[in-house]
Image (cartoon, grey):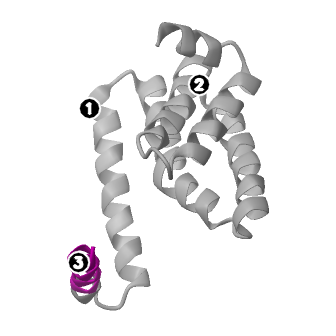
Amino acid sequence: MRALIGFIVRGRFQAIVIATICAALAPVFAPLNYVSGAVIGLMTLRYGAYEGFVVLAATTALFGTLAVLMLNSAMPAILILALTWAPTWVLATTLRLTSSQGAALAVAGALAVLAVIVFHGFVDNATDCGADCSTGYSREALRS
């Protein structure tokens, strides 16, 4: 693990490549999604918000290009950006600037509240949406 971290922090290019590879392999092995986010967070904590943002933007562009080439859709890149990389970058930037885990936790809570508000803005009836999703999963589980 120490060798991998040493390789990642060696430079931008290494971080971008590792984050992109982990994101591309995340559908096969889901925990790699967290590793791709950790790369963004590590670069932000180590080198600052600007460097972290450069890695975030380049990784999004590279992964988006791969997604378009393989799936004809940039949606996987948009989703991983919105759900993993951007919040990780915001929290790592907060932690680096304040050196306070409490402040980072407060920002995480604010992001969670914002996510709920945005979700309710896009979905007419969130309760029915959750029930529909769970019913669909139950049907799929019963079929297999």
Residue at mark 3 to residue at mark 1: CA–CA distance: 34 Å
Q: Is residue 120 above or below residue 102?
A: below
Q: Is residue 108 left or right of residue 10?
A: left
Q: Residue at 32% across / 68% down in the picture?
A: 116
Dot placed on the residue nearer the N-terminal end, 3 or 1: 1
Q: Nearer the viewer, mark 3 or mark 1?
A: 3
Q: Which residues are magenta?
A: 130-144
Q: Are marks 1 and 2 in contact (CB under 8 Å)?
A: no
Say whether residue 81 is magenta.
no
Residue 9 in sight from this viewpoint: no
How busy is the neighbourhood of tag 3: few (under 14 within 10 Å), some, or many (20 plus)? few
Marking on residue 102: 1
Residue type highlighted by circle 2: Met
Q: Residue at 56% across / 44% down in the picture?
A: 25
Residue where numbered disc 3 is placed? 134
Q: Is residue 81 left or right of residue 94?
A: right
Residue at mark 2 to residue at mark 3: CA–CA distance: 37 Å
Q: Quick one: SS at disc 1?
A: helix
Residue at mark 1 to residue at mark 2: CA–CA distance: 21 Å
Residue where numbered disc 2 is placed? 43
Q: Residue at 35% across / 35% down in the picture?
A: 104
The residue closer to the viewer here, 17 or 56, is 17
Dot placed on the residue nearer the N-terminal end, 1 or 2: 2
Q: Nearer the viewer, mark 2 or mark 3?
A: 3
Q: Is residue 37 above or below residue 126?
A: above
Q: Quick one: SS at disc 2?
A: helix
Image coords of residue 11 (percent x, y)? 72, 18
How busy is the neighbourhood of tag 2: few (under 14 within 10 Å), some, or many (20 plus)? many
